[in-house]
Amino acid sequence: MKTNLAKQVLPVAVFALGIAGAFTTHAMTERSKTAAPIRGYIKLNSEATSCEEHDMCSTTNNGTICRVGLVPSGAQLFGKNSANECKVPVYKP
């Protein structure tokens, strides 16, 4: 009787453990996709070679541009590219 019960319960337990592992892995992957905050800069000239550091922003496009003071009326902030120019669009965190 014990072996019959073990033969029926063991596959169900293994299946449940596999499902739990899949959900845990998926949640960890989604959490790692969130971008780390980056510094936003104001352009001080039209070439974007001179910039002033301001608020923290995000590189994740959520549709809301990052602005000074994180308010809609503030000046637009930018991230720096590899040439150290303030040309990369950044978004509200």
Image (tube, rainbow, N blue to C red):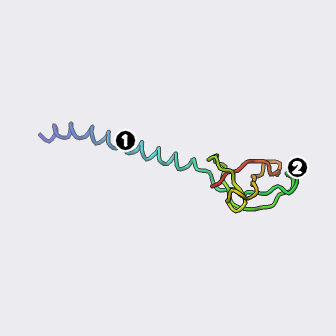
Residue under label 2, please give it: 47
Mark 1 vs mark 2: which is more N-terminal?
1
**Residue type (three-letter) at the residue carrying disc 1:** Ile
The amino acid beneath tag 2 is: Glu
Q: Position of residue 71 (x, y in %)?
A: 68, 59
Task: Report the residue at 43% width, 47% height from top.
Answer: 24
Residue found at the far front of this picture? 73
Q: Nearer the viewer, residue 67 or 86?
A: 67
Confirm or deny contact between disc 1 and disc 2 (CB under 8 A). no
Name the outermost residue toward the left.
1
Q: How crowded is mark 2: few (under 14 residues within 10 Å), some or many (20 or more)?
A: few
Q: Residue 19 carries which label?
A: 1
Q: Quadrant of the C terminus?
A: bottom right
- Residue 75 spot, x, y in % from top left: 76, 57
Which quadrant does the N terminus fall into? top left
Quarter occupied by residue 41 = bottom right
Most foreground residue, 74 or 92: 74
Secondary structure found at label 1: helix
Write the residue at 27% across / 37% down. 11
Secondary structure type for disc 2: loop
Where is residue 32 shown, x and y percent of the image?
Answer: 55, 49
* Disc 1 versus disc 2: nearer the observer: 2
Label 1 Cα neighbours within 10 Å, binned few <14 / some 14-19 / many ≥20: few
For image coordinates 70% across by 50% down, the residue present is 90
Near-viewer residue (26 or 6): 26
Which residue is at 16% across, 37% downward?
A: 4
Q: Tell me: 27 left or right of 71.
A: left
Could you tell me how far apart the alpha carbons at marks 1 and 2 are, in whole angstroms?
Answer: 53 Å
Q: How many marks?
A: 2
Q: Nearer the viewer, residue 25 or 77?
A: 77
**Label ID, residue 34:** none
